[in-house]
């Protein structure tokens, strides 16, 4: 499973999306044929992220339904269940179904609370994604609250790239309400400082994060930094 994920990530990093999809779909179908429901569920989770990042709702829908079936059949531990629910809920929100996503986020939160320490990075990812769903529903105060909850977690985890994600999200939230709000630039400055942290590990997750943050910098009028971040991602992906 780890090898399939590594290969799929490398393919996506090089922009070979069709090849990555073919690899994941073939592996999922093979697991289903072999009656390996646990592996199939893991691959469904990977595909949920793939179809969300690729903006492919027609691929996401059937895999999400299958994942829900497998969650009841396999009944994984709370951390695995919560992680899969976050993947699914994030896809729902990305495809215009944010209100539908919120109960799955709440369930994932409960799963994590039962099994993870309060400073685990997965809470930060959960809160950032919940914030996006609240923002899509027009609940800006709750969106800001959840981003700041993510920052609170990450302050206990130095040198983590999700700190940059949180500050880019906060900048976009403020800009959506008032583009002249000085907090927009301040948040982008803090995001860039986090990504420039000399103690940050430049690995696959860092590459994924800088590529994601680059879009926020570009949308908010800082193309030079966006170009720099995209170049970092390119160099890391080419090395995989």
Image: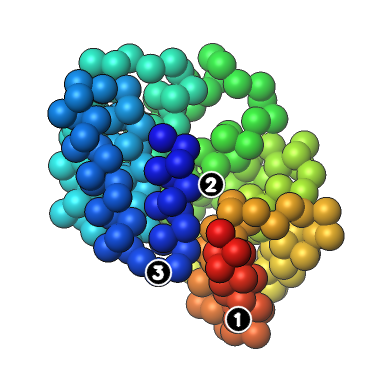
Query: In the rendered view, would you say 230 is above or below 213?
Result: below
Q: Say which mark, if any, is on residue 112.
A: none
Q: Secondary structure at mark 3?
A: loop
The quarter of the image holding the N terminus is: top left
- Tag 3: Cα neighbours inside 10 Å, few (<14), some, or many (≥20)? few
Q: Which residue is mark 3?
A: 15
In the image, 112 versus 235, the foreground residue is: 235
How far apart in space, not on screen, are marks 3 and 2 (Cα)? Answer: 26 Å
Res 158 seen here: yes
Q: Nearer the viewer, mark 2 or mark 1?
A: 1
How far apart in space, not on screen, are marks 3 and 1 (Cα)? Answer: 17 Å
Q: Which residue is mark 1?
A: 227
In the image, 126 versus 61, the foreground residue is: 61
Res 89 seen here: no
Q: Earlier in the sequence, mark 3 or mark 2?
A: 3
How far apart in space, not on screen, are marks 2 and 1 (Cα)? Answer: 24 Å
In the image, 140 versus 65, the foreground residue is: 65
Confirm or deny contact between disc 2 and disc 1 (CB under 8 A).
no
Q: Say which mark, if any, is on residue 128.
A: 2
In-image side of 103 versus 150 (left or right): left
- Residue 55: give x, y in percent of width and height: 29, 61
């Amino acid at each position: 499973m780890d090898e399939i994920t590594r290969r799929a990530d490398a393919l996506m990093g090089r922009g070979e999306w069709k090849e990555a999809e073919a690899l994941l779909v073939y592996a999922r179908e093979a697991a289903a044929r072999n009656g390996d429901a646990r592996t199939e569920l893991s691959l469904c989770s990977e595909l949920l992220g793939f179809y969300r990042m690729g903006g492919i709702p027609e691929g996401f829908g059937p895999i999400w339904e299958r994942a829900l079936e497998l969650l009841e059949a396999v009944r994984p531990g709370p951390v695995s269940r919560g992680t899969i629910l976050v993947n699914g809920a994030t896809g729902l929100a990305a495809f215009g179904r944010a209100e539908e996503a919120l109960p799955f986020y709440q369930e994932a939160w409960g799963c994590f609370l039962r099994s993870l320490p309060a400073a685990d990075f997965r809470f930060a990812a959960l809160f950032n994604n919940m914030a996006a769903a609240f923002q899509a529903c027009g609940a800006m105060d709750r969106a800001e609250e959840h981003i700041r909850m993510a920052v609170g977690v990450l302050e206990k985890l130095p040198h983590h790239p999700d700190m940059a994600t949180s500050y880019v999200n906060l900048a976009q939230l403020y800009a959506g309400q008032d583009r002249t709000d000085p907090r927009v630039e301040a948040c982008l400055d803090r995001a860039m400082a986090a990504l420039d942290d000399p103690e940050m590990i430049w690995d696959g997750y860092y590459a994924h994060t800088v590529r994601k943050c680059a879009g926020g910098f570009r949308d908010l009028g800082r193309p030079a930094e966006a170009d720099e971040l995209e170049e970092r991602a390119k160099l890391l992906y080419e090395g995989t």
